[in-house]
Amino acid sequence: MSSKEINTNYQRVKNNLPDDVQLVAVSKTHPAEKIMEVYSLGQRIFGENKVQELREKQPLLPKDIQWHLIGHLQTNKVKYIADFIDTIQSVDSAKLLEEIDRQAAKHNRKIKILLQVKIAEEESKFGLEIHEAKELFTDWLNGNYPNIQIQGLMGMATFTENKDQVMKEFTFLKQIFDKMCLQKPLKILSMGMSDDYPLAITCGANSVRIGSAIFGQRQYDL
Ligand SMILES: *Cc1c(COP(=O)(O)O)cnc(C)c1O
């Protein structure tokens, strides 16, 4: 992708987003120079899915970038990002939540997280079952994990052409989100990627994670 193409892509995506929808520019597999191009267009929130890749890029880039981790996170790797990560979107176990809390305390900061809920049919997708997400949320409301700020929920729909199914899954997560908000208002409902973000927004997403629609196709994947 040339700078010009990235610029065009970025403006197109921005124009498609209502003002109150947060954009996480997913920069995985793309080098720091490309990230810098999108940064120079005003973008400040970037998402990566691998700890090692994030650790390599973070020192090369401006300190006011808010990094979001969006991929599965192993408990033993939390320590490598705990001092700078803005939001961990992919929290999928109590064990992980505990470790993030511990590391946040160690660095004397609060770490924002989203609970990743499994809404897709595929077996392969990570995420909490609904009841687990509710339990963790209640535990947190009761004072557990004091160094964590639960910001909301994240979900990935099934990878399918079937828009009805995707819509069903997004709508389902929005309903869970609304119910949780009755206990305590949450800020972020993260759903939607390059192929399905307009639909996700229709279904109530207020944060989207967009990679290829900005940076172009990835050279390699996951
Ligand atoms: C890669 C990735 C995205 C972005 O995917 P695109 O289709 O390139 O927009 C969003 N969310 C997660 C969790 C990802 O791993």
Image (cartoon, helix red, strand yellow):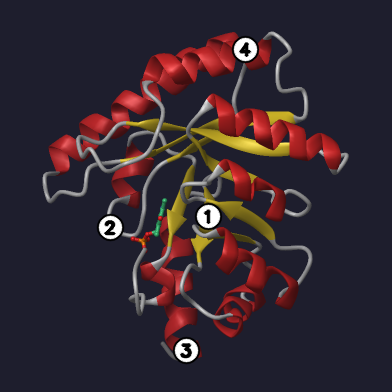
Q: Earlier in the sequence, mark 3 or mark 1?
A: 3
Compared across the picture, whether 10 is left or right of 142 comes to: left
Identify the image quadrant of residue 147. top right
Check disc 2 and give the amino acid type: Asp
Q: Residues within 10 Å of mark 4 (few under 14, many from 20)?
A: few
For disc 3, the marked residue is 4
Which label was assigned to residue 139? Answer: 4
Q: Is residue 51 above or below residue 58?
A: above
Which label was assigned to residue 215? Answer: none
- Alpha carbon of mark 3 to alpha carbon of mark 2: how far? 22 Å
Q: CB atoms at circles 4 and 2 under 8 Å apart?
A: no
The furthest residue to the left: 162
Q: Is residue 56 above or below residue 172?
A: below
Q: Residues within 10 Å of mark 3 (few under 14, many from 20)?
A: few
Q: Earlier in the sequence, mark 3 or mark 4?
A: 3
Q: Residues within 10 Å of mark 2 (few under 14, many from 20)?
A: some
Q: Position of residue 152 (x, y in %)?
A: 55, 30
Q: Nearer the viewer, residue 18 or 190?
A: 190
For disc 2, the marked residue is 195
For disc 1, the marked residue is 23
Check disc 1 and give the amino acid type: Leu
- Alpha carbon of mark 2 to alpha carbon of mark 1: how far? 14 Å
Identify the image quadrant of residue 175. top left
